[in-house]
Structure formats: structure tokens, C-alpha cells
Image (tube, helix red, strand yellow):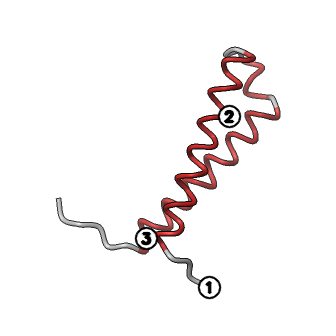
């Protein structure tokens, strides 16, 4: 089942924005410490970012890019 690439772009941008908001909030709340990398919120942040990245890679494989 092929998804509409424009829809995937919109969804991945929402995921990137969500992860940015979560990361910014948690860094302001807990600070930047080595323990942050082993917390639940960081795993959530990391999974959202990876899902969005794979969505972007899908779009780049389906849409012909313009000449630069």
C-alpha cells in the first residue's frame, strides 16, 4: 500500500515538531545530564525522531527531486 508522499511529509513534520516540543520542555525541566539519555522521555523523543526521519526518506525515494 503506497501512501501519498504529501501526506507523509505533513505527518513527519508534525512528528518533528512534537519531538522538538518534548525535547525542549524536558531539557528545561530536567536539564542536560548523562542520565537524560537513559530516561523514558528521551526514548520517546528518539523513537519519534527516527519515525519522522524514515518518513522523510520514504518521501525522498518516491518524489523526483528538482535539479540544483
Circle nearer the viewer, 1 or 2: 2
How much space separates mark 1 and mark 2, taking CA atoms? 31 Å
How much space separates mark 3 and mark 2, taking CA atoms? 28 Å
Circle nearer the viewer, 3 or 2: 2
Q: Identify the disc placed on residue 22.
A: 2
| Residue at the image point whose x is 59% and y is 36% from the top | 20
| Residue at the image point whose x is 52% and y is 52% from the top | 13
Mark 1 secondary-structure assignment: loop
Q: Identify the disc placed on residue 1.
A: 1
The image quarter in which residue 52 lies? bottom right
Q: Which of the marked residues, 3 or 2, is nearer the chain's N terminus?
A: 2
Q: Are marks 1 and 3 in contact (CB under 8 Å)?
A: no
The image quarter in which residue 67 lies? bottom left
Q: Which residue is the site of mark 3?
A: 61
Q: Which of the marked residues, 1 or 3, is nearer the chain's N terminus?
A: 1
| Residue at the image point whose x is 70% and y is 47% from the top | 47
Please name whichever residue, 1 or 15, is drawn nearer the observer in this view of the structure.
15
Q: Are marks 1 and 2 in contact (CB under 8 Å)?
A: no
**In the rendered view, would you say 16 is above or below 5?**
above
Amino acid at each position: 500500500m503506497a501512501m501519498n508522499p504529501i501526506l507523509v511529509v505533513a505527518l513527519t513534520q508534525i512528528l518533528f515538531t512534537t519531538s522538538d516540543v518534548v525535547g525542549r520542555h524536558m531539557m528545561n525541566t530536567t536539564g542536560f545530564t548523562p542520565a537524560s539519555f537513559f530516561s523514558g522521555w528521551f526514548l520517546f523523543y528518539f523513537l519519534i525522531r527516527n519515525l519522522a526521519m524514515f518518513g522523510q526518506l520514504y518521501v525522498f525515494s518516491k518524489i523526483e527531486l528538482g535539479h540544483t
